[in-house]
Image (cartoon, helix red, strand yellow):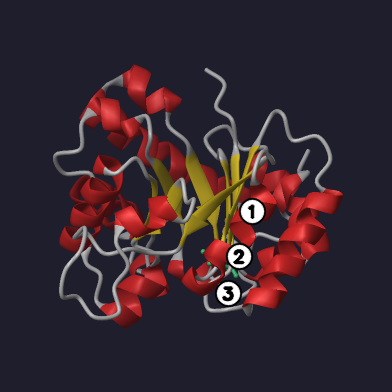
Amino acid sequence: MTRKPLIAGNWKMHKTVGEAVDLVQALLDGLGDVADREVLVCPPFTALASVRPLLADKPIALGAQNMFYELQGAYTGAISPIMLRDVGCSYVIIGHSERRQYFGDDDAMVNRKLKAALANDLRPIMCVGESKTQRDAGHAESIVTAQVRAGLADITAEQMQSTVIAYEPIWAIGTGDTATPDDAQAMHAAIRRTLVELYGAEVAESMRIQYGGSVKPDNADELMAQADIDGALVGGASLKADQFLRIIQFR
Ligand code: PEP
């Protein structure tokens, strides 16, 4: 089974509209042949509408970093899946560890958001990952596979075809500490085994599991070479065109 890797840039709370447009233009200028991989950028909400026209008919998809699960209503400050579709998003990141840490997104919230994304033709990237304390205590695999099970509750096998999982060890995000390729591969294999239990081998083998956590130009090749790593969710290095382009062009 060949899975097309997905290289996604999570810009977090960075880039004004003008900066976002410049970065997307620089990515387009340097992109090259990406026929065998998929590329995605997730700018802040405020820049989505402005970068959308640049991406029309181009091999870079547009995604958001979060959404609420209701379609509309009195939810001050929230953004709905309908709004994301309207502005040209095809992907949405759900349950990033920073959402879990600072905004109280728990597994139940992640699951509701996942369902709402899928019901509205958005492809969710569901983030899971353990803290340093949990890893040091030997609980990494049980924590991560429990997040996978809880986040995917009541998601059908058919919906899984539109779903991506991102394994992001919290201790590796924004720290410069990357999981070793072997440790990352071991966790990805554990996640895939969980998917086999939940959905059977065929669905599990077709699903993409991204790695995230200090992916940089100098470690991307080795990480992406692992059998169960199907792309990267990139934070800091996605903010600089030359770095993100090099990661996109992993070999
Ligand atoms: C992320 O934002 O999901 C991430 C992995 O960040 P960084 O690449 O900066 O560690």
Q: Amino acid at mark 1?
A: Pro
Q: Is residue 50 left or right of residue 251?
A: left
The residue closer to the viewer here, 43 or 53, is 53
Residue corresponding to mark 2: 50
Of circles 1 and 3, which is in front?
1
Question: x%, y% of residue 185?
Answer: 53, 43
**Badge 1 vs badge 3, beta-carbon distance below 8 Å:** no
Residue corresponding to mark 1: 53
Is residue 217 shown to the viewer in this render?
Answer: no
Question: x%, y% of residue 65?
Answer: 44, 64
Residue at disc 3, CB closer than 8 Å to ligand 1? yes
**Badge 2 vs badge 3, beta-carbon distance below 8 Å:** no
Neighbour tally class for label 1: few under 14, some 14-19, many 20 plus, Cα within 10 Å: few
Ligand 1 position by quadrant = bottom right
Q: Which mark is residue 174?
A: 3
Neighbour tally class for label 2: few under 14, some 14-19, many 20 plus, Cα within 10 Å: some
Q: Vertically, is 229 above or below 127?
A: above
**Badge 2 vs badge 1, beta-carbon distance below 8 Å:** yes
Q: Residue at image x 70%, y 67%? A: 21
The residue closer to the viewer here, 47 or 185, is 47
Q: Amino acid at mark 2?
A: Ser
Q: Amino acid at mark 3?
A: Gly
Q: Residue at image x 22%, y 47%? A: 115
Q: CA distance from mark 1 to mark 3?
A: 30 Å
Disc 2, SS: helix
